[in-house]
Image: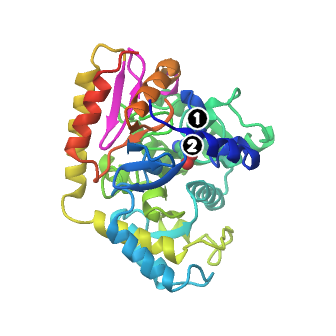
Amino acid sequence: MLNRTKSIAAYKEALKYIPGGVNSPVRALKAVGENPLFIERAKGVILTDVDGNDYIDFCLSWGVFILGYAHSAVLRTVNQSIKLGTSYGIPTLQETELARRVNHFIPSMERVRFVNSGTEAVMSAIRLARGYTNRNLIVKFVGCYHGHVDHLLVGAGSGVTTLASALSAGVPDAFVAYTLCLPFNDKKAVDHLFSIHGKEIAAVIVEPVPANMGVVPSQNGFLHYLREVTLAYGALLIFDEVITGFRLTAGGAQQLFNITPDLTTVGKIVGGGFPAAAFGGRADIMQMLAPEGDVYQAGTLSGNPVAMSAGIKTLDLLSQQGVYDALNKKAGRFVEQLRKQLAGKGIVINAVGNMFTLFFTEGEVNNFEDVRQCDTVRFGSFFRYMLAHGVYLSPSQFEACFVSVAHTEKQLDRVASIAGNFNG
Ligand code: HOZ
């Protein structure tokens, strides 16, 4: 057993001042029957907790660290940037530099606005979609999570799944009256809804590879169908690529599936480890944003120069030849190893590129209902077993794990063989 005395003491102290001792619910590790870890430092893919225990990490700050923690080139850039001041609330060259790179990686983001979190990016994209179309209804899919803004906390994945009700307390029914929630991968349900409300729908928002109910790939041209139906009815298609952007391929899921959404949200990787996110899309839509148009959106720390510098360096490193091919190949090999090691143990592994989830079930997992059938108690036992052996997985059945450029083949071999010895 690992000695975690200091983490436990830190948790008790945090509970005195911070609700649940954490600043984001999933970190409390309640879903897996553990106490939270308190981290002292991280380098590459190794997390070190306050007790000095090392863990090979597959959560990587929820997908942020595709290059691994504390990448020396990113740190150098950040250090230089900090010396020049950390925020001005006045434009900087770095904002345009990063926007140019975002547009280069994801050409559908013709204009880009930077914000501080994925939630903020999505919230702003939706307001813009409503302003542009002059319609109110938004369609989302059960199990997809788009941040904690009131009107999107319906049928949401990630930490919301641990609540007793499908809706967070504190969200008035009236706030979600314009949000329509459909099962993922269900073309018929989309078709039916559009046949009734098509002309009132401002936008369909989707995680093109849902990761917040665990990784659940789309099927039978579902995403292409969403593109067709939104075009037919004059609704916008919003890809929430907060997780998949700059991760699955340079151009995110939209490049992988060859679909051009009207608006895209990105986060996590784009800030290089700092709080930054962005939304962007067709120039004619983005021009509706203040100060050019009448859709208001603002933020004191938006486009923060330190975060922009970290994002610029991260995207530059990711633009080197062959990075994504090598990463996805390495991840594919690892997932195959895991599948072999865990065969016959009632575990199904869904994976897309370098994202994967181990589902504790015998059947296929194609939507949230399938995820709901999984044995979350066994998932918890597996999480705790891996943790005790120095491996940190994303701590819920309803989340994705990530392979990074910094994971070595040796580490991955070791993790696969540890997993293979799980007998719970
Ligand atoms: N929303 C994140 C999981 N999909 C959790 C973020 C965190 O706890 O840091």
Tell me the quarter of the picture where residue 214 sits.
top left
Ligand 1's quadrant is: top right
Q: Which mark is residue 4?
A: none
| Residues packed near mark 2 inside 10 Å, few (<14), some (14 to 19) or many (20 plus) | many
- Mark earlier in primary sequence (1, 2): 2
Locate residue 289, reporting x and y percent: 62, 70
Q: In the drawing, does residue 57 fall left or right of residue 305?
A: left
Q: Residue at x 69, y 46 (%)?
A: 13
- Amino acid on which the number 2 mark rests in the picture: Ser
Q: Quadrant of the N terminus?
A: top left
Vertical placement of 317 versus 357: above or below?
Answer: below
> Left or right: where does residue 207 sit relative to residue 120?
left
Quick one: quadrant of the C terminus?
top left
Q: Residue 7: which disc?
A: 2
User: Along the line of sight, which residue is nearer the eye, 419 or 101?
Assistant: 419
Marks 1 and 2: which is nearer the front? Answer: 2
> Which quarter of the picture shows residue 315?
bottom left
Asked if residue 119 is positioned above or below residue 332 in the image, the reply reads below
Q: Work out whether 39 lies above or below 182.
A: below
Q: Quadrant of residue 288?
A: bottom right
* Secondary structure category for the residue under label 2: helix
Q: Which residue is mark 1?
A: 35
Which span is picked out in magenta?
347-369
| 368 in magenta | yes
Question: Would residue 280 appear left or right of 314 to someone viewing this image?
Answer: right
Under circle 1, the secondary element is loop
Q: State the residue in front, 332 or 181.
A: 332
Residue drawn 56% across and 79% down? 86
- Answer whether labels 1 and 2 touch (C-beta < 8 Å): yes
